[in-house]
Amino acid sequence: MKKLTVICVLLICLVLLSACVSEIKSPPDDTPSAVPETQLPVAFPEPPNGLKEALESAVVHTQGDEPLRKFPYPYKAMLAITSDCDSTTVETFERMHRFLNTYEETQYGRGLGLDISDSFFVYNGSDYDTADNLMSYCEGIDPSTLKDAELIKRYYDCGWIDSIHALGDFSSSVGSYFNRSLAESAWALLDKAGISPTIWIDHGTYTNVQNFGAYNPNNASSYQMGDNPASPYYHTDLTLAHSIRYTWYSRHSDVFGQDYPLETRELRDGNTVWSFQRYSCEFIGTDIDFNWRPNRIHEQITSDRLDSIVRNGQYSLVAQHLTVFQEDEQMGEADIAALQLLAKHFHEDKDILVTRTSRLLDYAQMWRYLNFQVAEKDGFTLIRILSINDPVRGERVPGLEDLRGLTFYCGDATKTAVYIGDTLLNQSDFSLNPADETGRQSISVLWFKPDTNDYATAK
């Protein structure tokens, strides 16, 4: 009898220990909104008589007007780390993104499960960076010889890459190797592979004449020739005709939080593009202290700065070089702790939506330029999305994918229905949210489903 009792006690202990281990290893709740536990019905409830007719004459809201919430519920800020691929090897790229994007055990500790994307080079025409196996789509500046093309395609498809760092690195002591023919070949290669980055991040020194994000004849950006039709380096007609919608305004900034991240920029060839700024440095008198290296993340991402963007309801785009190979620039304990604090704000506090750069910019554009109507009757709310009045691409009717995260305040979330034009959407594509800090309920188009799979080729 005593032996049986001991066995039972041991079994109970094992069960409890197993439960504890399971709890420790289970990833944080990635759900970006308070989606009810039970699956929502496909159809919205039927509105009362006369409400659809009232919607026809309802006022058209735009410019982020009420009742549109500024950020997806329940978040109060959005942040993207926008990383430049200088000095990147396949090894350093995979090592860093396993830590950032997955929950795997890594040399930096358990992965953070964040949606952080990166950039890539098509060409490497630099004679400065001499590391072996620098990551680029083509070998050197030869478009007929592919190098890391398959890996870059892999990481673009899974979301670990969403930006192009110009068309390559053309930092050279003998002048620039860039020309329009290289741009034509690059876009032909990317089109064939189904790679369509929407973000252009200008790269490097004055020999990177393909740049165009901040041309000004009166300052250090006067070398930028990518948007000059009279230049042999002109390519923005090709680049904007393919997939690029956003470009970094390549002058440095010490502003961490922004009320709104986008503005339009007129190029010399008559094209217009969305432009954004990134936090990349601190100004010390007339000097610029660039802190966009992995070993200085703890100087960029601080508790005070994160609390500030939450308190002020702001966007933040943090420039980095996450995947550099130089040993003296790798992350230390303070940098890892800073990223863990950021992950806590996302997973646990649910006040900062950490997302890839393209998703932040797409969301910001949709939020500000959405045209929509709202009508209410007998506690029931109807919302009709009309169009997005995009100053760059023109007015168009958005699809459901374009609307990810948009959150509308309403009286009773269970008595709210949403249309795109005259098409009633499915309630199962939304989350019905309890009252937030304003005391109002809301309804959100579901944000992107978290993907924390390990896509790295080297484990």
Image (cartoon, helix red, strand yellow):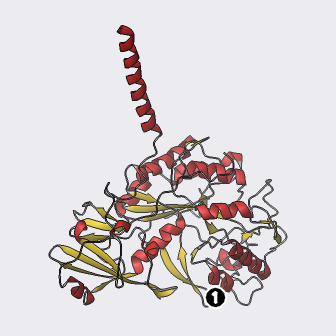
Viewer-closest of 223 and 249: 249
- Residue plotted at (40% across, 55% down): 31
Q: Quadrant of residue 237?
A: bottom right
Given the image, on which type of amino acid does mark 1 rest? Arg
- Residue plotted at (39% across, 10% down): 3
Across and down, in percent, residue 405 comes to: 40, 67
306 sits left or right of 378 in the view? right
Q: Quadrant of residue 414?
A: bottom left
* Label 1 CA crowd tier, 10 Å (few <14, some 14–19, many 20+): some
Residue extending farthest right:
174
Residue extending farthest left:
378
Judging by the rendered image, the residue that carries numbered circle 1 is 268
Q: Which quarter of the rendered picture does the C terminus lie within?
A: top right
Q: Quadrant of residue 186?
A: bottom right
Helix, strand or loop under label 1: loop
181 sits left or right of 46 in the view? right
65 sits left or right of 440 in the view? right
State whether residue 364 is above or below residue 384: above
103 sits left or right of 41 in the view? right
Is any atom of residue 271 visible in this view? Answer: yes
Q: How many numbered circles are shown? A: 1
Is any atom of residue 161 visible in this view? Answer: no
- Residue plotted at (59% across, 64% down): 286
Q: Which quarter of the rendered picture does the N terminus lie within?
A: top left
- Residue plotted at (64% across, 81% down): 242
